[in-house]
Amino acid sequence: MKQYIFGVDLGGTTVKLGLFRADGSLLDKWEIPTRTEDSGANILPDIARSMEEALERRGICRGDVLGAGMGVPGAVLEERFVKPCVNLNGWGGFDVAERFSALCGFSVKVANDANVAALGEMWQGGGRGSSNMVLVTLGTGVGGGVIVEGRLLTGIHGSGGEIGHLKIDPEETAVCGCGKRGCLEQYVSATGIVNQARRFLAQCADPSALRDMEQFTAKDVMDLAKQGDAVALRVAESFGEILGRALAIVSCVCDPEVFVLGGGVSKAGQYLIDLLRPSFLRNAFPATEPTRFGLAMLGNDAGIYGAAKLILDAAG
Amino acid sequence: MKQYIFGVDLGGTTVKLGLFRADGSLLDKWEIPTRTEDSGANILPDIARSMEEALERRGICRGDVLGAGMGVPGAVLEERFVKPCVNLNGWGGFDVAERFSALCGFSVKVANDANVAALGEMWQGGGRGSSNMVLVTLGTGVGGGVIVEGRLLTGIHGSGGEIGHLKIDPEETAVCGCGKRGCLEQYVSATGIVNQARRFLAQCADPSALRDMEQFTAKDVMDLAKQGDAVALRVAESFGEILGRALAIVSCVCDPEVFVLGGGVSKAGQYLIDLLRPSFLRNAFPATEPTRFGLAMLGNDAGIYGAAKLILDAAG
């Protein structure tokens, strides 16, 4: 019986790889650099070689490998075709599953990295035990993954779970990374939290430790909010108000059992959930009020776990 | 081979019934009154008797019936359990599939009426040819149904596709039927359109034929907007702005191939799509811009079609 699976998380700087047993246990994980030069011509061969070396190192027979799952930082159609990825200098625009399968000799499934992370958290992390969950990744941007009855909702244009781009404020004048205005990630991503703090500092004269800092991060803002800093607290409350409302909206569409918060901002922990829950309850369709909130548990490993799960799911 | 299916659409005033062949052709449709008195004790027996009579009338053997699907005006869990339905004086709170199956002797599947209508439109109506669609029912309220890869997204609390309750305006003071404030249906349902017109009439002094009408309907407003009436046009533009934005939000969550507009308001036809598309494009995540818009085609029969499809899908 085939008993090993590779999980690959292709990022803009590094590729994370994991070798799993079919029961979900992680045997080994490592990273290699992502070489984006030459239009990314080395990306897939580098990954294939690294997988090959891992098998040799452990004396695992190729025939014992069930397949390789891969998360990529872009939209993916039919678990194969990857649209050009901004974070990889435009790499993509072809059937990655087919090309990578030809290189490594294994069955390959590909999905969006935020979606794959959701699958990982459902399988072995903060969403464990639920097959209807939404992962909200609060990082530099805001990503998401919607899982319905255990399966990723990828969408017809590969944009299922793009909740960072839910329109929150139609009056916004600042432009989002996507080119539109007023998206969720402009307010609740790490970048958004810092920008909101700068706005609030400019708008009021309240004292704040933030005023003495030349540079500050979302973590600084959340830490100061916990300590009662007036401006940081306003930012945190606005974060909760906006994210709670956005998740209430998500619930009206796909009505998950649990929202799992991940990404760097989620390190603020239960405090974030306490911030957003009142707004969620105020804005939620009544039947969805019992929806639970949890925190991601796999950190940077969510991608490799979810990528491996793609293969397990395909194997049925 | 079992070749007949019943589709039942249980409403607050009438029950619509349809007898279908397994290929989807409608052999017969009829209605009976919904008797909500005595806590609705007659509802299921009345339907079972009416189905029985239909079989006798056509000389169809009971053994040739594959099953009966039913749409109900409330939340449904696991295609069986119906939560108490406001429009049926609180009828519900039990396993309708089990009880009705015991009465009629057929296999029974139950789903929410807006969801079932979506399934009907996908199967035989305005969403035909697509297995990823969202139906938006613009009636007295706003209902919805989300279909992903041919299957209804019902949600863990039965609130999947409750897009009438997407939060649109967090500053709204008027209360929605759901008890919260600022929901989509407060602006774009038939009732919402009339309320918006009253607001705009009160806020401005522009001439409008609406001022001379003691009572007017959403249809009056849309008809006058088409003729260029200044206030009606403002209402129509606001309708398009808000609905376009709401559907852009829905696309960020479940990214359908097509939105199908149904319900009484949708009789305004292509005009509605022309109203909402500019706002959709302005607010949409770029990858979802090619999403199509269509009009429902089955009218009041969408429910019986979709109910029959529940049985076909269950039969695999």
Image: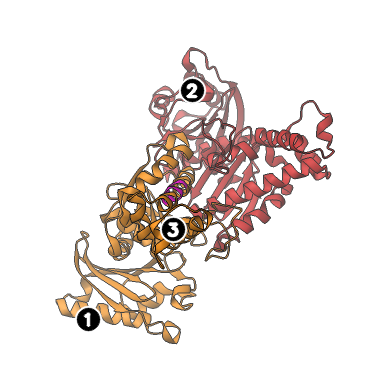
Chain colours: A orange, B red
State which chain disc 3 sits on.
Answer: A
| Quadrant of the rendered image containing residue A274 | top left
Q: Which residue is mark 3?
A: A193
Q: Residue at x 45, y 47 (%)?
A: A247
The answer to whether B120 appears left or right of A61 in the picture is right
Contact, mark 1 vs mark 3 (Cβ under 8 Å): no
Amino acid type indicated by mark 2: Ala
Would you say residue A263 is visible in this rendering?
no
Q: Residue at x 81, y 28 (%)?
A: B213
Contact, mark 2 vs mark 3 (Cβ under 8 Å): no
Residue A15 sits above or below residue A314 on the image: below
Q: Residue at x 49, y 38 (%)?
A: B3
Q: Which residues are magenta?
A: A236-241
Would you say residue A235 is visible in this rendering?
yes
Who is closer to the viewer here, B302 or A268?
A268
> How dense is the environment of label 2, judged by Cα within 10 Å: few (below 14), some, or many (20 and up)?
some
Residue B300 sits above or below residue A2 on the image: above
Which residue is situated farthest in the top direction here?
B38
Which residue is situated farthest in the bottom direction here?
A38
Front of the two marks 1 and 3? 3
Q: Which residue is mark 1?
A: A53
Q: Which residue is mark 2?
A: B48
Measured Cα–Cα span from mark 2 to mark 3: 59 Å
Q: What element does badge 2 sit on?
A: helix
Measured Cα–Cα span from mark 1 to mark 3: 42 Å
Q: Residue B143, position in %: x, y?
A: 56, 38
Q: What element does badge 1 sit on?
A: helix
Who is closer to the viewer here, A14 or B289?
A14
